[in-house]
Amino acid sequence: MNYSFFLFTQLYNAYVGIQYEYDLLYEDLLLLYSKYENSSYNNPDRGEYECMESFLMANESKIRAELVERKLCLPDWVD
């Protein structure tokens, strides 16, 4: 693990914050971090923190929806 990945995981906790089985969470964070690294959000002309923050904020609802679909968390609302 490097500092960038560690920072990404901490920002994930701050912005998404959904915790589930650690081995699944770790694999998901590796994939999500890879998506971030290959995205336009990973801009060397901006600060790393701000880039990661923007990526997670822009994708938060999609991440949450995927976790609900995979039954790794409950939806935020109840009918």
Image (cartoon, helix red, strand yellow):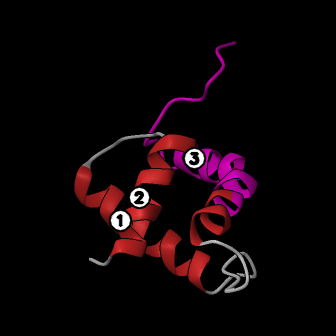
Q: CA distance from mark 1 to mark 2?
A: 5 Å
Badge 3 vs badge 1, beta-carbon distance below 8 Å: no
The verdict on residue 74 being magenta is yes
Taken as a whole, is the magenta stretch helix, strand or loop? Answer: helix
Q: Nearer the viewer, mark 3 or mark 1?
A: 1
Residue displayed at 66% across by 62% down: 50
Q: Which residues are magenta?
A: 54-79
Q: Amino acid at mark 2?
A: Thr
Residue at point 64%, 71% (across, down): 47
Relative to the observer, which residue lies in front, 28 or 51?
Answer: 51
* Disc with the residue nearer the chain's start (3 vs 1): 1
Residue 16 seen from this side:
no
Q: Which residue is mark 1?
A: 6
The residue at which mark 3 appears reads as 69
Q: Secondary structure at mark 2?
A: helix
Q: Which of the 4 image quadrants contains residue 43?
A: bottom right
- Return the residue at label 2: 9
Name the N-terminal-most of marks 2 and 3.
Answer: 2
Of residue 55 and residue 47, the one placed in the foreground of this image is 47
**22 sits to left or right of 50:** left
